[in-house]
Image (spheres, grey):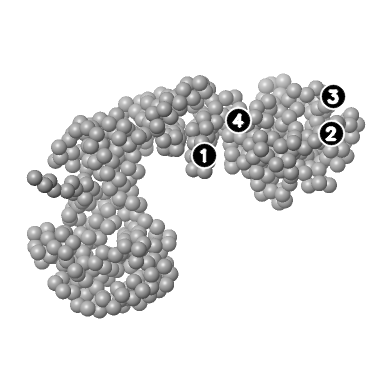
Amino acid sequence: MIMGAYEALYRKWRPQSFDDIVAQPHITRTLKNQIVREKTAHAYLFTGSRGTGKTTCARIFAKAVNCLNPKDGNPCLECEICRDAEAGTLTDIIEIDGASNNGVDEVRNLRENAVFLPVRCKYKVYIIDEVHMMSAGAFNALLKMIEEPPEYVKFVFATTEIHKVPATILSRCQRFDFRRIIPADIAGRIQYIAEHESFSISNAAAHRIAVLSDGGMRDALSLLDQCAAVSETIETETVEEAVGVAGTESVFLILRAIAEKNAADALERIDLLYQQSKDMTRFADELSQQLRSLMILKTAPNDPTLVDMMPDDLAALQEIAAMYTLPEIIEALGAIRQCCDRMTRAGNRRMELEMTLIRLCTDQQQSSGDFKALTARIAALEQQLADLQRHGIAAAPQQLPPPKRKQPVSARGIPAQNLQIETKPDDKQLQPLKNWAAVLERFYEMNPSVAGLLQNSNAYIYEEKNQLLMIVRNSMFKYLFKTTDANLLLDAAEQVLGRRFQLRYKNVESENEQTAPPADLLFRRAQEQGIQTAEQEDAGL
């Protein structure tokens, strides 16, 4: 016995009429009214994210305008036109893939065929999917046909990238924007389908699929199909196993570890997920999604409906939110999003994620939230020191003992000409960089995780060799500062200062007063003159 071919759920349950389309009433209602009143346009443009019903709606429209017995703007689905259209044997409804038929010659063939009358239908309907893939020449060749088509020809264009469609085409079409489908509507459709199939699904599992589908019904039904192949009873664990995601338990554990500064727990869970062959990039994206939820809960705690989650998960997330401040959440979210970007280019994605989590779980991230205020304090202190220098209160830097020269070396693979660890040049040639706080603020916007390492740092300009000397007071700096971080810092300095420098740095945390940089001596002398720093004022000294 030969069994029939299996039909995927997203094809089997594709909507047949406008009333079956989920979450697009603003579009279906308008199209139905136009069909009932016989005031349909000659060209339509459907735009929206993938899986929201653009092509399906175009097919229903093509059937409805040609149906022999339409019902309130819907196709009857019973006449020969509807049956043949559904079977794909109706020659008067032509579907064209814009990606593979994007040249001028293909459009010319379309124009030549469009002049012939429909064979069986009232209208000849051309559905062009992914129309943004057509070339500029093809659009120009199509322009005249769209502007003045034969009265029996209609066009329906579908695209996910509306910005790539020329304005000359847009102005000649009626545009309909398909909305991203909310998880509640997707979950309801999933449960409806499960009731008519040979499997069952829990509410939590349906919601999990809806969230993973990111607003696309087709993606949701594909995931449902995949889960149904694993088990006839679909639970949340079934979904996570079939799709390969880590699950909310692991995400919540990592979020608690970051809040508690417990790097060991975070690394242990990453190792477990790695052994289970979980996708590190996808897990990082899950972390960022839940951090976004934390941000919303922290910002609008009285409106949890803004976070679409099951009640149990929402209660757990609210508990975690109480462990964070809003600035800490925003900084962690920024660090994880940057990690996601780096993982797309990194050879070892696990290591990228581990490094980010270690930074978030250590004291190097204590700059969260108040970094801009800190840079403002540094700027104020530098201005005070500059004023002291002008009035002769502080001794000139050239009175310091001459430093010992060191050979330029490379730090963690950084070319010596870009980043050198050596002592400063002659103090007479050094000029304090007054805009250092602004440079740090710009660098913080680019890389907040590493910017935290530069707290209490100073910078000087060595004009003769166009070099920037950075004085750093952080024992972790030389271990965590990388080539990419150095390049970003130079980019930030160029944006603020309008010129490109070579970067050198010196770590002075463990050095004694004899080898301290000029800024440290100025700082001490300022204190001896009775000048209070911003930190002292905050402490009430």
Q: Amino acid at mark 3?
A: Gln
State the residue lying farthest toward the front: 1
Residue 279 is left or right of residue 129, and the answer is right
- Label 2 sits on residue: 405
Residue 538 is left or right of residue 230, and the answer is right
Q: Residue at horizontal 25%, vertical 53%?
A: 25
Q: Label 1 vs label 3: CA separation?
A: 44 Å
How many C-alpha atoms fall within 10 Å of the one at disc 4: few (<14), some, or many (≥20)? many
Nearer the N terminus, badge 1 or badge 2?
1
- Label 4 sits on residue: 367
Quadrant of the image occupied by residue 231: top left
Q: Label 4 vs label 3: CA separation?
A: 29 Å
Q: Position of residue 275 (x, y in %)?
A: 41, 27
Q: Nearer the viewer, mark 4 or mark 3?
A: 3
Q: Position of residue 193 (x, y in %)?
A: 18, 42
Q: Label 1 vs label 2: CA separation?
A: 38 Å
Q: Nearer the viewer, mark 1 or mark 4?
A: 1
Q: Are marks 4 and 3 in contact (CB under 8 Å)?
A: no
- Label 3 sits on residue: 514
Image height check: is 113 above or below 97? Answer: below
For the residue labelled by badge 4, is the local secondary structure a helix, a strand or a loop? loop
Residue 443 seen in render: no
Q: Amino acid at mark 1?
A: Gly
